[in-house]
Image (tube, rainbow, N blue to C red):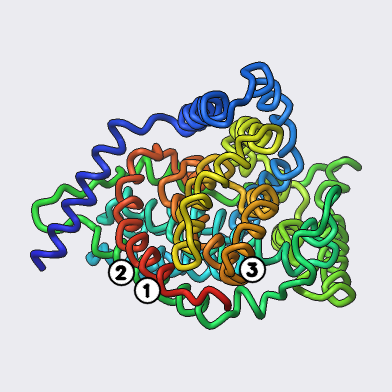
């Protein structure tokens, strides 16, 4: 018990430091921009004008994924805000004993880890939406630890699980590594998920990550004399999303059309039918991506609401939760442009590879991927940027593509637990500043980081 109390106090102290020194998420984004510009000019030797224009031109490179993420947020939000979705989340939040706060933390941590193993976007949104329900039913639970618990899946397992972008890219026919827009192919064959995600070593790592992260966040809940931070009932009620209320139908043609369920059933049915058709004809691995995820939740939201006015109201409320995505993504796009439009990405890669060997390469790539994730927090985009440099370096050192990919995927999670980008839905839905719970997620990252670095020293070089 003394050890648990010490760990809990350390988490509380780390949270206090983070709240004091970590600013708003958009400001963090601009700090990272300044660091990237500095490294580009003074490290990679990029001309200042070139660096600035590469950043400026890159701002618009992530508009498609910005829209995709925005739909992810409001589509999942609309599902939960349907009457069946609201009932399901509320029933789930009643499972823990309100007098035992750790049970509430355990519920949220397990939920976010399981959803993270299935799909990153599902985890990204649903775990954040569950916080208000759990906090309302378990008012004695520390709100900071709850927010950190909702961070577990995104921060630990998603990159190397079923929806890991890098692994899906390598398994996709005609991917950029096999058919690049210019130059020679990076690899000469596909790498199916059975060789990467379902490799025995990767499955073992996912199991260890899940157990350690859940145990750590539960151990961090304040105990003894450590103060517990909770929210008053008024704040909890304001945070909790509510199902839309529909006005009685008026005796007008417009009102009659607006209240016909056929529109929602028609749209939802076509969306889900098209998704099912694509999966049948293309296969699950190729058809399942962020668009498929959005189709699932958009189609379900339409069917669950039934009434067009209810659906539209839920989407409008969900857009409030997506503001962080809309605001921050263009600026992360600028950093992305700086990486791809200048020699900065190549310089950083060469810096790490230069001091590596076959035995140390997985560890180097693990750390490198985590550092790069801070600048380009999109696993798929980051892999496309770095694979042309990382895979040839691995080949030169005698390390297989599978080993490299596993190290790279897990490395992308190294900094997720302290990256404000990953907390956008949590901050938007709860109104809790990132700095208030970043200390707790950091403390979870300490044992995970140590375990993974040791694992990278023992991973076979030729999986």
Tell me if residue 365 can be seen. Answer: yes
Q: Does residue 286 appear to the left or right of 413 in the view shown?
A: right
Numbered disc in front, either 3 or 1: 3
Label 2 Cα crowd, 10 Å radius (few <14 / some 14-19 / many 20+): some
Q: Position of residue 176 (x, y in %)?
A: 79, 56
Q: Nearer the viewer, residue 268 or 149?
A: 149
Tell me if residue 132 can be seen. Answer: no
Q: Position of residue 21 (x, y in %)?
A: 31, 31
Q: Under tag 3, what secondary structure?
A: helix
What residue does disc 2 label?
215
Q: CA distance from mark 2 to mark 3?
A: 32 Å
Q: Position of residue 188 (x, y in %)?
A: 79, 68
Which residue is located at x 50 percent, y 77 percent? 460
Q: Under tag 2, what secondary structure?
A: helix
What residue does disc 3 label?
401
Tag of residue 211: 1
Q: CA distance from mark 2 to mark 1?
A: 6 Å
Question: Can you tell which quarter of the image residue 363 is in?
Answer: bottom left
**How many numbered discs, if any?**
3
Q: CA distance from mark 3 to mark 1?
A: 27 Å
Q: Does residue 265 appear to the left or right of 82 in the view shown?
A: right
């Amino acid at each position: 018990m003394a050890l648990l109390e010490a760990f809990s106090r350390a988490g509380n102290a780390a949270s206090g430091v983070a709240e004091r020194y970590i600013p708003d998420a958009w400001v963090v984004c601009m700090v990272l921009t300044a660091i990237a510009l500095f490294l580009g000019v003074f490290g990679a030797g990029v001309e200042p004008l070139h660096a600035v224009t590469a950043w400026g031109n890159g701002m618009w490179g992530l508009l498609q994924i910005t829209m995709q993420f925005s739909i992810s947020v409001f589509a999942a939000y609309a599902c939960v805000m349907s009457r069946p979705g609201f009932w399901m989340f509320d029933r789930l939040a009643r499972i823990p004993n309100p007098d035992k706060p750790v049970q509430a933390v355990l519920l949220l941590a397990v939920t976010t880890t399981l959803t993270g193993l299935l799909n990153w976007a599902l985890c990204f949104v649903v775990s954040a939406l569950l916080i208000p329900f759990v906090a309302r039913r378990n008012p004695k639970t520390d709100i900071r630890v709850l927010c950190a618990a909702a961070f577990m899946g995104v921060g630990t397992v998603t990159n190397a699980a079923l929806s890991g972008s890098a692994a899906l890219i390598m398994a996709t026919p005609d991917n950029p590594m096999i058919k690049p827009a210019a130059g020679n192919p990076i690899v000469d064959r596909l790498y199916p998920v059975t060789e990467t995600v379902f490799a025995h070593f990767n499955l073992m790592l996912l199991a260890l990550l899940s157990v350690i992260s859940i145990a750590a966040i539960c151990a961090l809940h304040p105990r003894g004399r450590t103060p517990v931070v909770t929210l008053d009932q008024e704040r909890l009620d304001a945070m909790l999303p509510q199902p839309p209320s529909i006005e009685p139908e008026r005796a007008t043609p417009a009102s009659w059309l607006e209240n016909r369920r056929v529109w929602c059933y028609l749209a939802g049915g076509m969306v889900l039918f098209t998704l099912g058709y694509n999966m049948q004809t293309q296969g699950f691995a190729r058809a399942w991506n962020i668009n498929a995820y959005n189709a699932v939740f958009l189609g379900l939201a339409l069917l669950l609401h039934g009434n067009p006015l209810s659906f539209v109201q839920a989407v409008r409320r969900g857009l409030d939760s997506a503001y962080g995505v809309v605001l921050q993504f263009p600026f992360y796009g600028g950093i992305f442009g700086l990486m791809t439009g200048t020699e900065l990405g190549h310089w950083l890669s060469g810096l790490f590879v230069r001091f590596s060997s076959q035995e140390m390469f997985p560890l180097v790539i693990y750390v490198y991927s985590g550092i790069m994730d801070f600048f380009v927090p999109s696993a798929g985009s980051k892999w496309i940027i770095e694979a042309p440099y990382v895979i040839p370096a691995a080949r030169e050192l005698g390390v297989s593509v599978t080993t490299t990919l596993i190290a790279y995927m897990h490395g992308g999670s190294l900094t997720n637990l302290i990256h404000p980008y990953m907390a956008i839905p949590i901050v938007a839905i709860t109104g809790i500043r990132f700095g208030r719970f970043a200390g707790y997620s950091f403390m979870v990252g300490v044992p995970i980081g140590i375990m993974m670095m040791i694992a990278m020293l023992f991973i076979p070089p030729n999986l």
